[in-house]
Image (cartoon, rainbow, N blue to C red):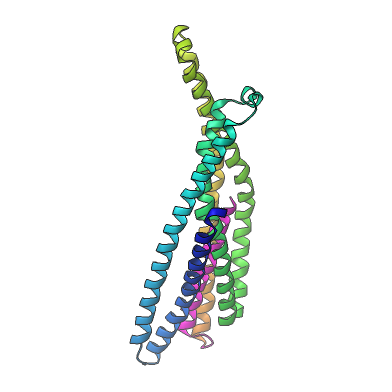
Amino acid sequence: LRPHRGVLLLVATLSLAGTLATLLQPLLTRAVLDAIGNSEPAGRLVAGLVALLAVVAGLNAVRDYLLQRTAEGVVLAARRTLAGHLLRLPIAEYDSRRTGDLLSRVGADTTLLRAVVTSGLIDMASGMIMIAGAVIAMVLLDPLMFAVTAGGVALALSGGMVVARRVRPASRAAQERIGEMTATVERALTAARTIRASRAEQRETEAVGAAAEAAYRAGLRAARLQAWIGPIGVAAIQGAFLLVLGIGGARVADGSLSVGDLVAFVLFLFFLVMPLGRVLNVYT
């Protein structure tokens, strides 16, 4: 990442600006609803809200492009460095390791670095800022509703963390099986003339098929675990949303909370839960 420090600093700045601008959206929305409810002019507020949405979209577009470009640069540098390292290994290493497995490290494993850069570093940092801002705003809007919804979200996401801890070793195992499959294919292709001369095509095909089957089973184990994370996150969002609607509706009915405050609270709730889901995804 060292050669990309300047770009990453710019990306972090754009991400911070976009996050702060996003956190302003519920407040402007509340101001619009309160103005309409009080029969006051809301044209400027609406225009400001539209302009804010456009600014956030522009900041995110520039940030995402720079981040994708940086990720590709990181992958390129990793592949060059790793290729140079592999070519300078002691000969004994080549004897103890399968060539196809080393090729898989250069190809499949370095590709995962792209996800680390695009969905890991910046998402984690901006997500934590978004979570902190949303929590502060929700506490200021209504401490009681925040306490109830925070309990529901924490309960649902704790289950996601339990599953997430099992996804990481399963994903690593899947990558190792892919490396073994690549090694099997590489060995068969290298010895293609010998295999053809000895009529061993069927045996080698079965060996490659067995390696592919092992990679398939490892991928399925990871997929089964990952399949639970999404529904758990959705359940957290829906449960918290229903709690907010129920409690918030009652508080609006007794006059202790305005409609604008309730809408702003709901928006902040989404800004709280969505980054939590991204952080959980990064962890896996």
- Residue 174's place in the image compared with 113, above or below, is above
Report if residue 231 is visible in the image: no
Span of residues in magenta: 255-284
5 relative to 47 in the view: left or right: right
Front-lying residue, 8 or 245 = 8
238 relative to 164 in the view: left or right: left
- Residue at (38% x, 81% y) in the render: 48
- Residue at (52% x, 53% y) in the render: 117
- Residue 9's place in the image compared with 171, above or below, is below
Front-lying residue, 191 or 48 = 191
Front-lying residue, 255 or 66 = 66
Is residue 70 found inside the magenta-colored segment of the image?
no
Magenta part, dominant SS: helix
- Residue 43's place in the image compared with 242, above or below, is below
- Residue 52's place in the image compared with 106, above or below, is below
| Farthest top residue in view | 198
Where is residue 58 shown, x and y percent of the image?
39, 67
Where is residue 193 shown, x and y percent of the image?
45, 12
Is residue 261 found inside the magenta-colored segment of the image?
yes
Where is residue 189 shown, x and y percent of the image?
46, 20
127 relative to 22 in the view: left or right: right
- Residue at (46% x, 15% y) in the render: 192
- Residue at (49% x, 71% y) in the render: 17
Total marks shown come to: 0
Front-lying residue, 2 or 235 = 2
Report if residue 146 is visible in the image: yes
Where is residue 76 shown, x and y percent of the image?
49, 44
